[in-house]
Image: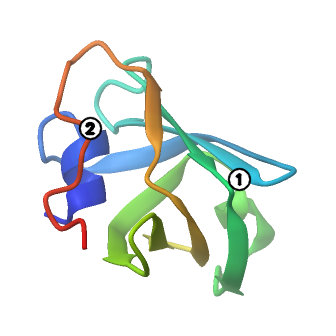
Amino acid sequence: MTEIEKLLFRDGGTHAVVGFKLSENQITLHVAPWTQQDAQTTAEFSEAKITSLDLYADDADALNLPWDIIGFDCYPVSQSRWRFVLHGSGLEYGFESLWPQVVNDACQRDASPSGTP
């Protein structure tokens, strides 16, 4: 699992994006296990900049939430910034931001990435 998956995924099982909000310089992401979609983890990515968006869904309905998460990668860019790539079954979303703040999570986990440069 990547550092961002360790932070956001509850049990290592399959997860979905159940909420996604893009506002000025911030992305708010709500993820949950497929089997328990009411058990959401919410993360806020501040100072966010969209770097890419690739859509490859067979039809427009595949872009409706929830999005199946195939993988969620993260790479350090500088001392404070990270590049994130969210791979879904119908899209790939890339962005850079600060490491996210988990603002809603029933499970307490260490929020700092071990791969911080």
Q: Nearer the viewer, mark 2 or mark 1?
A: 2
Q: State the CA–CA distance, disc 2 to disc 1.
A: 29 Å
- The amino acid type of the residue labelled 1 equals Asn
Residue 38, position in %: x, y? Answer: 44, 17
**Residue at the location (34% across, 78% down)?**
75
Residue 63, position in %: x, y? Answer: 70, 63
- The amino acid type of the residue labelled 2 equals Ala
Q: From this view, report whether residue 64 is shown above or below residue 10.
A: below
Q: Residues within 10 Å of mark 2 (few under 14, many from 20)?
A: some
**Residue at the location (18% across, 49% down)?**
6
- In the structure shown, which secondary structural element does the residue marked by tag 2 occupy? loop
Q: Is residue 8 visible?
A: yes
Task: List the residue tagged with mark 2.
Answer: 111
Q: Earlier in the sequence, mark 2 or mark 1?
A: 1
Residue 37, position in %: x, y? Answer: 41, 27
Query: In the drawing, does residue 105 fall left or right of residue 116?
Result: right
Placement of the N terminus among the 4 image quadrants: bottom left
Query: In the drawing, does residue 25 fall left or right of residue 16?
Result: right
Q: Residues within 10 Å of mark 1 (few under 14, many from 20)?
A: few
| Image quadrant in which you'd find residue 50 | bottom right
Foreground residue among 90 and 105 = 105
| Image quadrant in which you'd find residue 116 | bottom left
Q: From this view, report whether residue 68 is shown above or below residue 40.
A: below
| Image quadrant in which you'd find residue 18 | top right
Query: In the drawing, does residue 23 fall left or right of residue 9?
Result: right
- In the structure shown, which secondary structural element does the residue marked by tag 1 occupy? loop
Residue 64 numbered tag: 1
Number of numbered labels in the structure image: 2
Foreground residue among 79 and 35 = 79
Foreground residue among 101 and 42 = 101
**Residue at the location (13% across, 47% down)?**
12
